Image: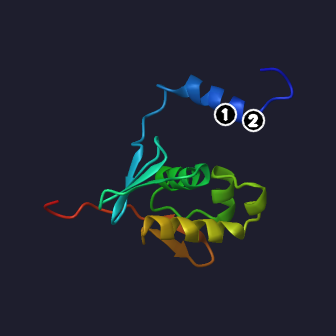
């Protein structure tokens, strides 16, 4: 890579070089009434509707997927899912999470007062 290094290009090249060396995670997260396909950046609702997920929403979901049932602080989430210039403050993560929860219609992303947020994966219903 030529200097100055574009961080997105560096991240993409690292990801390509690590592909196949790391265990694969499912690209789909299941919620109460929808599934998020992180590879295709879309939300598939149980009623058949499809909505697009933006890059920030996908990054947040990937952060939760990598660390389920673990409390992630606002700083953790900002480092794993960097925000745009308008949302770069640590407290803005509250708004991002609130919008994400509303869009998905989930209670699987919990607020941990004084700690941050925790993703509790939705368990399949017996017989489903």
Where, quadrant-wise, is the N terminus in this rendering?
A: top right
* Residue 54 at x, y percent in the picture: 57, 52
Give the vertical position of 115 relative to 8 (above or below).
below
Residues 50 and 1: in front is 50
Report the residue marked by disc 2: 7
Q: Is residue 36 above or below residue 25?
A: below
Q: Secondary structure at mark 1?
A: helix
Residue for point 37% across, 62% down: 31
Between residues 33 and 66, which one lies in front from this camera angle?
33
Q: Position of residue 46 (x, y in %)?
A: 30, 60
Q: Foreground: 109 or 116?
A: 109
Which disc, if any, is residue 103?
Answer: none
Q: Residue at x 39, y 43 (%)?
A: 26
Residue 11: image tag:
1
Circle 2: is it few (<14), some (14-19), or many (20+) Cα within 10 Å? few
> Which quadrant would the C terminus be assigned to in this image?
bottom left
**Residue farthest along the front direction in this orientation:** 49
> Dots 1 and 2: beta carbons under 8 Å?
yes
Q: Position of residue 7 (x, y in %)?
A: 75, 35
The total number of labels drawn is 2
């Amino acid at each position: 890579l030529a200097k100055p290094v574009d961080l997105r290009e560096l991240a993409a090249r690292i990801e390509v070089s690590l592909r196949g060396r790391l265990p694969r995670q499912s690209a789909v997260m299941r919620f109460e009434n929808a599934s998020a396909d992180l590879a295709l950046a879309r939300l598939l609702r149980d009623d058949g509707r499809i909505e697009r997920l933006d890059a920030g929403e996908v990054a947040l979901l990937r952060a939760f997927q990598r660390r389920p049932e673990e409390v992630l602080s606002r700083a953790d989430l900002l480092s794993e899912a960097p925000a745009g210039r308008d949302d770069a403050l640590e407290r803005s993560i509250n708004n991002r999470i609130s919008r994400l929860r509303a869009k998905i219609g989930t209670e699987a992303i919990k607020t941990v007062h004084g700690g941050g947020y925790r993703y509790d994966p939705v368990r399949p219903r017996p017989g489903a």
